[in-house]
Amino acid sequence: MKTRSEIREDVKEYYGKILKTKNDLQTSACCAADSMPAYLRPYLKNIHEEVQSRFYGCASTFPTGINGKTVVDLGCGSGRDCYLLAQVVGPDGLVIGIDMTDEQLAVARKHVTFHTNKFNLDKPNVDFRKGWIEDLSTANLEDNSVDVVISNCVVNLSPDKESVFREIFRVLKPGGELYLSDIFTGRRVPEPLKTDPVLLGECLGGALYVEDFRRMLAKVGCLDYRTVSKTSITLNSEEIQRKAGMIDFYSMTVRTFKCDFEDICENFGHVAYYKGTIPEFPHGFTLDDHHFFQTALPVPVCGNTFKMISESRFGDHFEVTGDFSTHYGPFDCSVSPQQEGIPTNGNDACC
């Protein structure tokens, strides 16, 4: 059985030495179809070609409403997502990229001046730091200091995932958001495959069984999360198919917030109205695969959803009626409303 430090070194070797571009990957896991929001696509053209060629993400980690906010990208790699979001947070915001791989950080830092000029900024609004995602103090991140933490296909690579989530909720401000895309499974990955260097580097060996993910969040105090999207992973390598073809792998984007949630959705009679004030989404806002808020129309929500939209940075964009004085029992999540841009695939986010 390999130690955590040995697994970490295998990952550094794979991403620092073996992979030269995303074309070297053997599955679609770390480069799944990227459903990038339309408003971000023009920004992609402003990002240096070398940065894009070393991108190994698995989905879209682009939360909305982040102008002027501090965003941390765990496992930023060459910095593609950082440079995308730098154009959204604007001159008053900051994007902090954290990675442990010197070769990837070198690419990201090499192009800071290029992107500062390209974005017409007086000074950089990105900061690339070497550190461990299991201990964010190594990157000088303080308690309650960050508005949003994103991570794109990186947590699966960590040998100590519980510490990663504990650190995330340490550095998030109250009401701050974790917006995570990663590889999940419908069953636990067998122990021998968890340390296979190729499977680990391809984001499969460390993939999280979705129920273990739920339990891990609960252990660090987060009792609710929401699925935003879910896509099956194809195994293009015959060798990988032989080893792990019995496992159902998914690229999933999930979100949760640093709030005091209950462990199931409870009904307190809350009703939410989206004001249409997030510039990119004037006609409606999608929270997850079960919640689409059409502008100005009332939507009954559970107590946890109330907290997600009222205690976070989205509070200014919603009007919510009701309080927690009267309880009406569990919230009925059996009917999922039709939503824009979210596939109907039977995901089991609580609401």
Image (cartoon, grey):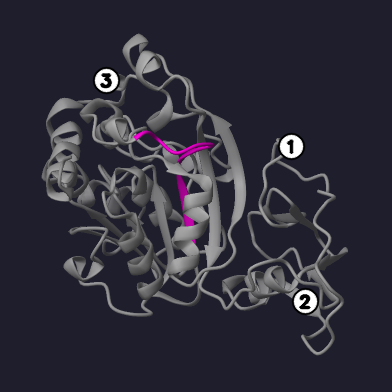
Query: What number is the disc on residue 314?
Result: none
Answer left or right for 199 relative to 45.
left
The type of residue carrying mark 1 is: Thr
Query: What number is the disc on residue 344?
Result: 1
Q: Which residue is mark 2?
A: 319
Neighbour tally class for label 2: few under 14, some 14-19, many 20 plus, Cα within 10 Å: some
Q: Tell me: residue 244, above or below residue 105.
A: above
Mark 1 lies on a secondary structure that is: loop
Mark 3 lies on a secondary structure that is: helix
Q: Position of residue 326 (x, y in %)?
A: 84, 86
Q: Earlier in the sequence, mark 3 or mark 1?
A: 3
Span shown in magenta = 178-190
Please report the residue visible at 49 percent of the width from the left and 56 percent of the height from the top. 179
Q: Position of residue 2 (x, y in %)?
A: 16, 41
Q: Earlier in the sequence, mark 2 or mark 3?
A: 3
Q: Tell me: residue 131, above or below residue 195.
A: below
- Front residue of 276/299: it is 299
Number of numbered tags placed on the structure image: 3
Neighbour tally class for label 1: few under 14, some 14-19, many 20 plus, Cα within 10 Å: some
Secondary structure mostly taken by the magenta-highlighted segment of the chain: strand
Mark 2 lies on a secondary structure that is: strand
Residue 312, quarter of the rendered image:
bottom right
- Callout 3 touching callout 1 (CB < 8 Å): no
